[in-house]
Image (cartoon, helix red, strand yellow):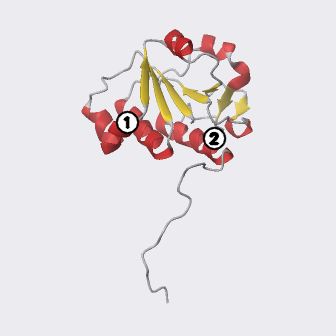
Amino acid sequence: MLNIVLYEPEIPANTGNIGRTCVATGTRLHLIEPLGFKLSEKHLRRAGMDYWKDLDVTTYMDYEDFLNRNPGAKIYMATTKGPNVYTEAHFEPDCYIMFGKESAGIPEEILHENKENSIRIPMNPSIRSLNLSNSVAIVLYEALRQQNFANMQMTGTLTKYDWD
């Protein structure tokens, strides 16, 4: 199972959207405190809709707590400072993909320790960054694509229409 890690997220609507994406994809969500909101906030619940109750979510006191409780975890760091494009990474089925807080990203000292696993989403150089929930969706779906969307519904059904 893939894992999304949010380092000190600040905006409840982003975390709610990400939680909903995690439920839709069977992905675990890990939240590293401090959070910029309470997990009971209505904005978080509204963005996560009624899916929040189905979310596999774990919170951690800080980054060190996260590392201690997930020893040996393969962690990819998503950052605008990453030397590697996210499509070049080979995501393992049980890897962790970490995203930083909206205002500052992942701290540089953490990135320096993980430079070889730091990835980026290409974008126009005049843009500072993409929205956090959009970034998570982009990278997560690449990881899922690499795993052939295992255990996901791959076909849709249209209501019968007369197309003539």
Q: Which mark is residue 16?
A: 1
127 to 153, vertically: above or below: above
Quadrant of the image for the N terminus?
top right
Q: CA distance from mark 1 to mark 2?
A: 21 Å
Q: Nearer the viewer, residue 6 or 103?
A: 6
Name the N-terminal-most of marks 1 and 2. Answer: 1
Q: Count neighbours of disc 1 (C-alpha within 10 A) and say few if under 14, some if 14 to 19, many if 20 or more.
A: many
Q: Which mark is residue 63?
A: none
Residue where numbered disc 2 is placed: 143
Task: Pinpoint residue 141: horizontal percent, then vertical percent.
Answer: 58, 45
- The residue at the far bottom in this view is 164
Task: Pinpoint residue 7: horizontal percent, then vertical percent.
Answer: 49, 21
Q: Nearer the viewer, residue 124 or 72?
A: 72
User: Which amino acid type corresponds to the residue marked 1 in the rendered image?
Assistant: Gly
Q: Residue at x 31, y 26 (%)?
A: 39
128 with respect to 21 (left or right): right
